[in-house]
Image (cartoon, rainbow, N blue to C red):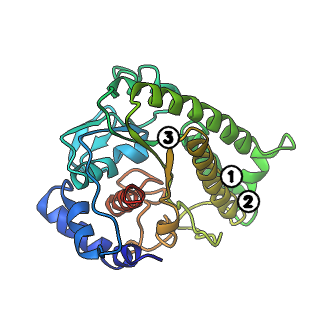
Amino acid sequence: MTQLARTFRSTARTASLAVAALGTTAGLLGGFMAPAASAAEPDQPTYDNYVALGDSYGSGAGLSLVDDADCDRTQESYPAVIAGAVKAKSFKNVTCSGATTAEMAKAQGTNPAQLSALSADTDLVTLTIGGNDIGFTEIITNCVVGSFSDPTGSPCKTQYNASGSDAITTRINSTAAKLTVSLEYIRALAPKARVLVVGYPSLVPDDGKACRPGVPFADGDVPYLRDVNKKLNQALADSAKSAGAEYADTYTMTIGHDMCQNEADRWIEPIETKLAPAHPNRWGQYAMAYGTYNQLRK
């Protein structure tokens, strides 16, 4: 574990509370990284024109300081933190709750295609996408419903394997192909940009341990959902590599901070919450910002 990661684990909650008191996340990451950096580490990166693309995990859904209610886009999103950290002169955040890879190239309601935010001057792009392509909300709903009738089994896994092969794995493979196409468009529209595909954080315990009744997934479905989480991230990483982009890992650092943890340690909200269920809270968004920034420093 790097010194940056050790510092993050020990100070993330304190730093985030301080930011909440100040009412802004804009300068958080840059200020946080400074004391953690060593002479052996690269200088803090800066970018002039940053565009953030993606879904609700990128928009900061459910959090405060809302910029766009239709897209549930907030100033507590990881792109907002990154924009401050890289001292972006221009920051276009077009992330939108519910977005799929299709919305990269077509309108989502009254919101134009996300790719339209790119230009030849764009020098940094982050993209978190894929969860809605595989049916994230549907999967969570079906797994919760299934747990009511078979709490100690794996009804959700059984449902998605009813045809003899795993339907979600098929969806993930399809999503990877779509992402590769989106990344090719990004490269064409923003040829000078550094492009980062930002993965999804750890949503359920990495050890596969169930946590009923706090999070109503059947015992056998927790390791199944963990594996879905990991498979999707691996597909995103592979697509990024094949398209000449980079992948920012947010899963590893969020292990132990999933939706099953107590409130003090939880960076992902549980199913029953006043925020966005199964989504990063303020600390989770900060963790995603850290993972993204850590990749930018390489």
Q: Which amino acid does label 1 sit on?
A: Gly
User: What numbered label is drawn on residue 129?
Assistant: 3
Q: What residue type is labelled 2?
A: Asp
Q: Position of residue 279 (x, y in %)?
A: 44, 53
Q: Which amino acid does label 3 sit on?
A: Ile
The disc, 3 or 2, on the residue closer to the chain's N-terminal end is 3
Q: Would you call the spot at circle 3 few (<14 residues within 10 Å), some (14-19), or many (20 or more)?
A: many
- Residue at the location (19% across, 62% down)? 20
Question: 95 left or right of 209?
Answer: left
Quadrant in which residue 85 is drawn? bottom left
Q: Do the residues labelled 3 and 2 touch (CB within 8 Å)?
A: no
Q: Where is residue 249 in the image (x, y as percent from the top left)?
A: 50, 58
Q: Nearer the viewer, residue 17 or 118?
A: 118
User: What numbered label is drawn on residue 146?
Assistant: 1
The residue indicated by pointer 2 is 150
Q: Which of marks 3 and 1 is in front?
A: 3
Q: Do the residues labelled 1 and 2 touch (CB within 8 Å)?
A: yes
Q: Which of 97 and 231 is in front in this view?
A: 231
SS of the residue under disc 3: loop
The disc, 3 or 1, on the residue closer to the chain's N-terminal end is 3
SS of the residue under disc 2: loop
Quadrant in which residue 121 is drawn? top left
